[in-house]
């Protein structure tokens, strides 16, 4: 199996490449990544001399480049995206370019070359839940942020390519990932970094917004299973039923790092902030036999440990661009 992985230098994509090469000894990977602020080749440093792995710096919007790379491939898995909700609020344009136009161009490439494309989508396409209930694959798509709207557009474009052109497309909609190598703009690594530095921990609104947290390795296992065995044209929810309010996670991090809760600072809420996500994942469990294996408590402890042991990895990302972003976002 030879795959084009797009966005493989990011958080989930880099975990997936490691997972694929380890679990499928015959697999080969071409990783196409534009190396935006979120792309980091440090995540893949151990693969530099791996013969089954090749990195190409480039844009998923570059159809000719993609076309040349996929000759001889068996499929495409698209991780490439602008992925941070807060950045989509301050600058939605690149989200439309990469997440919508880029994904459509990849679909066109996959269709022409008659190969499977897996689109890595998100639970955010469904919008927000009240205190009860879960999203199923047939829940309506009601995205509320420029990020989730752009992901919903690409997700629906997959549907259109299947129904209109009979293209071989599968979609996964996963909940919030956590684990090593996550860019420190996202909740868990941001709070670990700030707690470590004894800086204030900015919690949006009342801190009672709920996310369903899944370890990135469990997500990667689901993606490979759906790519290999999922039915064309189908969508698969991927969640772990680990629902936690943000404030609870922040307190656990402080507790683990032995820092006082007085570091918590309740700040202005994110506009359009979705209150709760929860996924019903019985389809992927029944059809493909997938189950999440890493309990949140264990995974969070290990993740905190990883960040504490890899301070240099975090420090390398705190460049001028990030510091400017942080200043604008939290000032
Ligand atoms: P990330 O921001 O860490 O990585 C995105 C990667 O895409 C980066 O390496 C970046 O350089 C690359 N990229 C961006 N624009 C590109 C372009 N035009 N061409 C080529 N490469 C480009 O994101 P992530 O958290 O790893 O998420 C990966 C995918 O999974 C995204 O599609 C995201 O929407 C989806 N997803 C994420 C989560 C989560 O909790 N992080 C949950 C569900 C789904
Ligand atoms: O649900 C899947 C989605 O999860 C993915 O599609 C996105 O790519 C990914 O970024 C993530 O989106 P969220 O917006 O849920 O993740 P984030 O880590 O940005 O925020 C998690 C929660 O924490 C959310 O309710 C907002 C809150 N938060 C976040 C930050 C960065 C804070 O309270 N303070 C913060 O500083």
Image: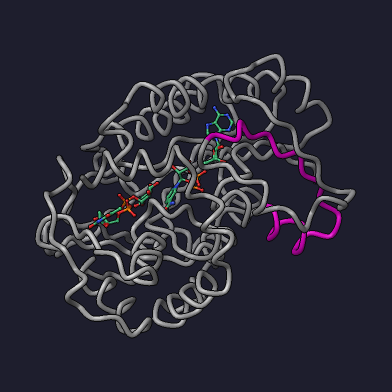
Q: Nearer the viewer, residue 63 or 260?
A: 260
* Total labels drawn: 0
Which colouring convention does the figure follow? one colour
Q: Nearer the viewer, residue 39 or 281?
A: 39
Quadrant in the rendering for residue 110: top right
Expressed as whole percent of the image width and height from the top left, the position of residue 96 reads: 39, 23
Residue 200 appears left or right of 58:
left
Q: Which span of residues is magenta-colored?
A: 17-36
Expressed as whole percent of the image width and height from the top left, the position of residue 231 reads: 56, 45
Residue 313 appears left or right of 48:
left
- Relative to 158, residue 260 above or below: below
Quadrant in the rendering for residue 278: bottom left
Task: Say which residue appears at 27% left-offset and 71% top-offset.
Answer: 250
Q: Nearer the viewer, residue 317 or 240?
A: 317
Q: Nearer the viewer, residue 14 or 2?
A: 14
Task: Say which residue appears at 84% left-offset and 60% top-offset.
Answer: 25
Expressed as whole percent of the image width and height from the top left, the position of residue 37 reads: 51, 38
Task: Say which residue appears at 78% left-offset and 34% top-offset.
Answer: 73
Task: Say which residue appears at 65% left-offset and 16% top-offset.
Answer: 63
Expressed as whole percent of the image width and height from the top left, the position of residue 211 reads: 28, 61
Residue 190 appears left or right of 30:
left
- Relative to 73, residue 42 above or below: below
Q: Residue at the far top: name it.
A: 64
């Amino acid at each position: 199996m030879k795959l084009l992985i797009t966005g493989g230098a990011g958080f989930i994509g880099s975990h997936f490449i490691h997972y694929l090469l380890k679990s499928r000894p015959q697999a080969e990977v071409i990783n196409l990544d534009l190396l935006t602020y979120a792309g980091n080749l440090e995540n893949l440093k151990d693969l530099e001399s791996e013969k089954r792995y090749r990195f190409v710096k480039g844009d998923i919007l570059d159809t000719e480049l993609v076309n040349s790379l996929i000759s001889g491939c068996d499929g495409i898995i698209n991780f490439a995206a602008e992925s941070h909700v807060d950045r989509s609020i301050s600058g939605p344009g690149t989200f439309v370019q990469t997440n919508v136009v880029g994904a459509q161009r990849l679909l066109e490439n996959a269709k022409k070359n008659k190969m499977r494309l897996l689109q890595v989508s998100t639970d955010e396409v469904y919008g927000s839940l009240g205190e009860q209930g879960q999203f199923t694959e047939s829940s309506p798509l009601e995205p509320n942020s420029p990020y989730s709207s752009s992901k919903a557009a690409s997700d629906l474009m997959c549907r259109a390519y299947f129904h209109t052109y009979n293209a071989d497309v599968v979609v996964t909609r996963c909940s919030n990932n956590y684990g090593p190598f996550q860019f420190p703009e996202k909740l868990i690594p941001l709070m670990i970094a700030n707690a470590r530095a004894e800086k204030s921990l900015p919690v949006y609104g009342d801190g009672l917004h709920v996310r369903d947290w899944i370890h990135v390795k469990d997500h990667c296992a689901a993606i490979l299973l759906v790519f290999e065995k999922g039915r064309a044209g189908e969508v698969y929810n991927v969640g772990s039923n680990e629902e936690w309010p943000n404030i609870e996670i922040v307190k656990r991090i402080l507790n683990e790092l032995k820092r006082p809760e007085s570091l918590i600072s309740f700040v202005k809420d994110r506009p359009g902030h979705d209150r709760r996500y929860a996924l019903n994942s019985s389809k992927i469990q029944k059809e493909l036999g997938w189950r999440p294996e890493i309990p949140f408590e264990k995974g969070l402890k290990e993740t905190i440990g990883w960040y504490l042991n890899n301070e240099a990895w975090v420090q390398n990302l705190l460049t001028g661009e990030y510091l400017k972003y942080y200043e604008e976002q939290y000032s």
